[in-house]
Amino acid sequence: MANREQVLGFLPQKEIVYNKLLPYADCLDAESNEFLSEIKANLGRAVALRELKPGAAHWTQRLVTYIRLYGRKFSKEDHVMFVKLYYELMTIPDLELPLVQKFSQMLTILLKKRELLSRDDLVLPWRPLYELVERLFYSSWEPYGLEWYPSSIENVIKNVVRMCRVYFSVESSAEMLEEWRPLLCPFDVTTCKAMSYFEMFLPTTLPPEHHDKGFKLWLDELLKMWDNCHNCPSWEQNLVNLFARVALDNIGYIDWSPWVSKLFTRLLRSLNLPVGSKQLQVGRAGGGYDVAVAGIWIVSMMGGPNGDIVLDHIQRFFQAVETYFHPSNNGRWMGKLQKLIYKLPSSVVKRLHRERYRKQSWDRLVPDAYKLTDTELEKVVEYMKPAVMLAIFSKTGSQDAAQALQNLALIRPDLIMPPVLEKTYLAMETLTEPHQLTATMCCVVTMAREMVKGGRYPEGPSNLLPLLFMILPGIDPNDFAKCMITFQFISTFCTLVPIVDCSEAVQTRTDLTEREKELCSSTAGFEDFVMQFMDKCFALIENSTLEQTTTLDTLMEKMSNQEGMVEIGLTSTFSTILTQSSPAIYQEAIKKLFHFASSHMFETKVSGRMAANMCRAASKAHPEYTLKLFLPHCAQVIMKLTEAEDVQKEEQLDDELLWNLQMLADIVRCDGLSLVTYRDQLVPVLKRSLHLTCKDGYQQAGLLLRHSLRALTLVYPQEYRSMPFHFDRPLNEYLPIRDWGTPGNLFELGLRWHVPSLEEKKLALYLLDTFLQPELERLKQHTEGTITLSRDELQRTLMIVHDGLIGAGAIMPMWEEDITADFVKSVTPLTGFSNTYKVKDEVFEALLKHRENLRAVICKVMLKLVDHILTNSEDDTKSLSFIIKIYSAVLFYYGTLKHEFDGRWKSFTVVKKAIEDKLHGKKRHIRALLVDRVSLQHEMRVLDKEHAPYTPMVQELLQDLLKLSTSHYGEVRAKAQQAFLGCLQMYPYCHLDLIPSILTYLKDDNNITHDQFKGALYTLLGTRSCCLASHSEYPVIRQLWPTLLQAGHSEKPSIQRLIEDVTDRIHRNYETVAVQSEVSEACVDLAKAVLATKKPPPTCTPTTQELEGAAKDLERRNKATLDIYHDLVNTLLDLLESGKLRWRFVQISIGMLTLQIRRDTPLPPRAVAMFTRSLVDETITVRKMSIGAVVAILKQLKREHKKKEIEPFKEGGCQPPPPGSQVPLGERDDNKWLQYDSSKLPKTQDQWDSTTFVDKTHWGFNTWPKPMLTYAPADQQPPLGRKREDMSEGEGIIFDHFSSKEFVDKLIGFLSLEDRKGRDKFSNRRFNMFKGLFRNYDDALLPLFKPHMERLAADTQEFSQRCLAEIVAGLIRGAKHWTFDKQEKLYEFLLPLLKTVMTNASVETIGDWAQSMSSAVENRDPRKIHWLLEALMEDCANESGGSFLYSSRLYVLQSALNQQEWRVPELLHRLLAHLEPHLPHVYKNVRDRLGSVLTNIFMYELPAEIATPTGSPRRGKFLQGLLPKLAILETLDLERNGNGSQGNGSHGNGSQGNGNGEEPMEVQDQAQDGALGETDEKKEAIQLIKTVMKWMISGLARMYHGVFPELYQLLPLIMPLESTEKDDELQKDAQVCLACVAQAYLAPNVLPMAMEAVKQVAFGGLWRARLSIMTFLQVLVFCNLFLVQSNKSVVADIRKLLLKLLQDEQLEVREMAGTTLSGFLQCNLIALDKDLQVHFNKLCHTKLPKRKKLTDPGVQEALIQRHAGVLGLSACVLSYPYDVPDWMPQLLLELGDHLNDPQPIAGTVKKTLSDFRRTHHDNWQEHKQRFTEDQLFMLTDLLVSPSYYA
């Protein structure tokens, strides 16, 4: 590195290492220093002179390019300086967001490599970034359309925060907590905001000595909150993300052991797996966990003293979910499970890399005691292996499993590879299941490197050749998927190993191990493999011939996509094999290929292309040998076949001639130097073939010219072998098998470049002079009229020009010409870099100087030719298409094209990802991949032509392309537009020059055709990445928008759609740009510091005079922009008011004007008047847009209200807590003053003035914000009741309109019309309009609205009611700052109105009124709106009008109280007292509403662990009061059936007789004939339990802490109700309620109570209840698996309970107990130990008394015991559905002994054996290995039904 410091003058941070391997590497250091100086000078200058656009933005883009080309090749000082500058730029207050986005992206790039800058080097303040995020994510302007944001800015900002938080100061955590803790009110949406801030900002990388100022300040608090809020709150994922991050960054510093069970339980719950015999699943809130994040958290908890706890949970987790991975168990959950098995091993590998292999940086290391040990790694692999093996054959594809296996194989290849290879060999032997073969091959490919390397799996390499031979049948033309995976398989393995026969080494070397000797011997098969592979390929080619059977087929003379992919697969695989082969093998292969190619003829479209590509692969790998065989042969055949003169004129040529031309065109794609020797054979062939009349013929000749020139002129690597030398060294010197799977060494890559020699370049010039120049001359003569070329001749000529240009573009420099006059003013030059991308050759450059620039010559000829064609033969679309291609090549092509590069880059990243060594890292890629990356680095340099000089000739070319973009012919238009848009990206500012030309085609002019019009629109529309229409700069839209509005009229639907698309794109992509921009002094100072840096020094610095004038220049630019803004708005208004716009454009123009309403610049009064007038326009669309605009204008005109600081503790009359102590969450003495107290309501002016109102409901529930601000007294606020003359012009216009009775009448008339029948709902936009009106104008406008409101209240029509609901909500919210007397008068008017409304409520409108009340009281202090709340409470007590009106009043009250959250405990108590008598209501709709209201009432009770006790009602106490009323339910069944405890167990054979069994219950609201509810008391109890169940269902879904201990007292009451059949409502409620309770998350302290309730039911009298409790228990246990497992006494209780129920007298109960036991054994809840098996065996051998009836009591008892034993053994068998443990064979035979027992035993055994056979069928070949021959014979006898004929 010291050497680099001497060369560069500074120590670079991190260079792109690949640059050192480029052939011109020696000149890159000077070049990069020059570029860096230029960037520093111009970036510093732009910012210092306060020009962010275009100056700073342009040079930011240049810095991005610099980093892409050279890496972070600047000193640490420069790096820190750049970071600080961009941080300051990004956080300039009110900076326009497109620039925020650009600077943020730059900052992300600068901070991406975290190891380069430590916390000592850089500290960043967090608050400016927080203010930026607050402005963006929680903007009060954007929802109103006063600001328009770039669509991707949210992710950009999140990324930049992620990068910056590493560098926040030590004190920042405490500051953040102080800022955001006050937002933590769990009932309020602000909690989501606080949690997202915590997740985004909290730094977790502080060093251990500062942990007390870091995560220790908040981790326990947030973990408790996570632990106690169970119901998937929306912010839970934020917390999990934060916990995963803190765990990852602090491995070994946090004790996670108390939380492990809880995390795994929640992870399992979030997968939403179907469980239980019923599988009735109730949807849970939240989208579940991101399993990738959960995986990181789990892996970060591993290691150290408590690491075994995590490993134990991983084992149990995968045991529990293993069966879900089986292919037959597919479902919605599969995606998450697949992602989990991929992400978990990936996280382990990343952690292992960090602990063992990563280069050390300032980031702290994991303490040694917490590093993962080999034993732990082995356990992880073993625990995951069964699930991953099942996932291989998933129906959703094997990709995730393959990636999981790749990572697991990196950890322990010896554990993973043998089973995968075994499955692969099995799959290769079976013909019936091709999916198995492709899936296993896919997995083996990902583990290829580990396999061939040997190392920790020494048997791996010996599998290679057997696999290669067995895979060959996969090259099958009839199975595309198998064919492709076969090519991938062969290609991957051949890339990793030298294909060299090493068998002789056994005799010649003495240093070989036994394994090496075996391997050497096996390599003798390589040659045979290559020959067989080629035979398969030849068969594939012969099967792929294109046969034309009809004339229709000639249109389809192309490869299908599949054929194209097979061609690529075939070519790359063959190329790899030849590249990796020893001379002996490749020579044989090439001879075989030559024999095949020379003895066959192919059509040129499909099979010919495949065969020619094989020839190309051979030529590329070994050019000298291949050319020697092929080129003379092809040339000779071609010359011979073209001897006759008439061949030149034939339109259909001989197949042999075409095939040889095609073959020759492909074999010249090789090393150029080898080609030079064949000059005398190539030139005559080109002379003969380039002017053939046959199109196929001259196209192949053109390709021959192109490929020859490319081979001669391009810079490219010559080989891609896995080692940097030929494989022709003697075996005693070099043994290739020792280099199997060896990574390339980047520092000894031995890369050989093809750099064009002078001889090659001269040959290229000769070819251009011989074949290109004459064609240009002919074109010149054709345009001048000297000669006339037919269309075919013209196309052929243009094709030759194009091929010559694409062939030799790398040695054709751009012409030199003065740049077009600047149309962009800037204080810096807006230029690009001129990169070096070729080796300097002075002789050749001197040679070129004496020649005319070929690109310029071509351009001049083409410019004339275009005019000639457009004048004389515009329909010659093919020629015009060629010219467009030539234009593109002239401008863009210098050796590679962007789309080709993008394809190669994508391919490179895919291959890299597939076979990279993620464990060791450090670029240990295979050599071919490294060579490819260096080659891509070269191409990247070639392509960097952005900001190329915009010269007059380029200008002419673009004008031509624009002309062609508006051609009459669609084909030409499309191609020209594509080229034109490419130019816009290459010359980023040229659109300013071209837009006027484009807009001329949009004018309403009869001379402009439809096609020109359409072409211009398409050019504006562009693509997503380059769209002229969506430019937001004012100089552009000032020209564009008015022209678009005055565009010509066309009835064509296609043009109308296009106009819609353009305007839609304008709206969707519009971004608010600054009218007034500012640059902070801090930015200017940092820019000056950048200019003052020395290594390397900036090229120039601004003068003092320039610096002094910068502020005035900025002011001048701001004024100019403001003038353009006003001009644009006025122009749009002029057009709109002129009456000349068509109706469609009227709407578009209003839409455009809405985009120009800004928060920082008042809208001109004319526009305000227009929008206000349009509120009563006849057109509904215009009205809707105008409402939105008026809302925005009212927001813009809103006056600022003053705030004052208050002392909350003083207000509450209590002492503040001592400094440093934390205020607890919840209701306390210091926040009680915020709560509603009817005895202290402000009912007089004095009381009102002395009350401190706090509108935001979340303030005070947690800590108080500092400072705590509320609104100042009324006398300090903006005056209310202003006169007209006191208003601004804009305010006055709106006031005048709304003061007009006629206007208001018309407006209300329109607003109370139906819009979309049946789909209308409460409109927030209209509500906001009324809110704005009453807020801005006080009560001045109310008198005009009152009569309408009274009329609407009396009208029962739904649209009238909806309109009134919007007005009322807006009025109440808008009256926020009204004086006490005005408020009082308002409610005097409103409350009677609301009473009327509630009596007129209907099903359609009640939702709107609920929304109205919710909106009205949102963020309002309840004491400020006490009139409304009291009126709603009072109205609720009114029960007149039937059940619907009663439930409606409850709904409206609920909506209002819900917004008040924790502040109204008094009202909640009053409401509960009112509701209690109504709970057993006779009507269902009321009961449903009561259940929902009860949830809201009890919502504010939080667990004592996180909050103080609430003053609101408590659930436990309430439920205790209900239990006595429900006790009567216990007697229902006993009264119905005298012996309800008796089931039909008395029928030992399991028949379902009704002898003395229990009948299904009948439960009805109105019982008849002595049914269940024959007394009022019982009826009431049934209705009450229905309400209670509704409350439970609602509460468990909506409350944070849904489960409470007393809840389980209801279980014995509800469980029997599930089996009622006569009362469907009761049955369904019971089922859903029990499903909700079963799925609920159980805190450890609640678990014992739940278990007690389960035992009470299980040992109770009703057999149906006992049956139900087991399905309930299945779900409860699985949803809380790890918490249950960690409580040993509960597990013991469950075991005891199931063993007892296995001997239940009722058959159904016994069978369900067996099923439940099987599930619990499967997820390892109950251990399958010896004791359990002995117990079941003992029961099985219970003797049945002989010669007695089965119905005798003694026999019945023995039969039940024997059946219990069989059920237990069956449960053991069925608990392993896809595996055969050692004990199972014997156990199956024991079960078989009971096949002849009486029923139901025999039936159970048969079913068990049938299930065993079904689940083990897929892998029976594997499973049967576990049985002895005798066992297998006996088992077969049991499983196979006896033959009917036996």
Image (tube, grey):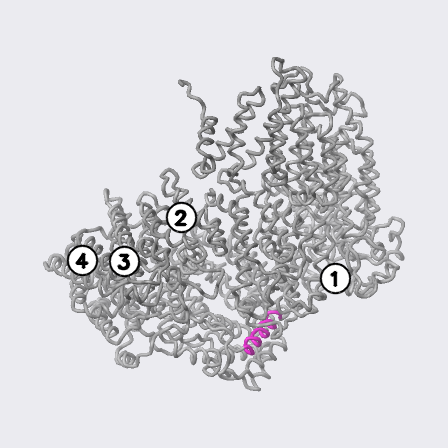
Please name the predominant secondary structure of the magenta segment in the image: helix
Residue to which mark 2 is pinned: 441
Locate residue 1126: give its quadrant.
Answer: bottom right
Instruction: Say few, some or many: other residues with alpha carbon within 10 Å of mark 3 (under 14 / 14 to 19 / 20 or more).
Output: some
User: Residue 876 — which label?
Assistant: 3
Helix or strand or loop: what does disc 2 sit on?
Answer: helix
Instruction: Say few, some or many: other residues with alpha carbon within 10 Å of mark 4 (under 14 / 14 to 19 / 20 or more).
Output: many
Contact between marks 2 and 4 (CB within 8 A): the answer is: no
Q: CA distance from mark 1 to mark 4?
A: 86 Å
Foreground: disc 4 or disc 3: 4
Residue type, numbered disc 2: Met
Is residue 1411 toward the left or the right of residue 356 in the image?
Answer: right
Helix or strand or loop: what does disc 1 sit on?
Answer: helix
Foreground: disc 1 or disc 3: 3
Foreground: disc 1 or disc 4: 4
Q: Residue at x 65, y 19 (%)?
A: 1756
Foreground: disc 2 or disc 4: 2
Q: CA distance from mark 2 to mark 3?
A: 51 Å
Q: Nearer the viewer, residue 909 or 1599?
A: 909
Residue type, numbered disc 4: Thr
Q: CA distance from mark 1 to mark 3?
A: 70 Å
User: Residue 1284 — which label?
Assistant: 1
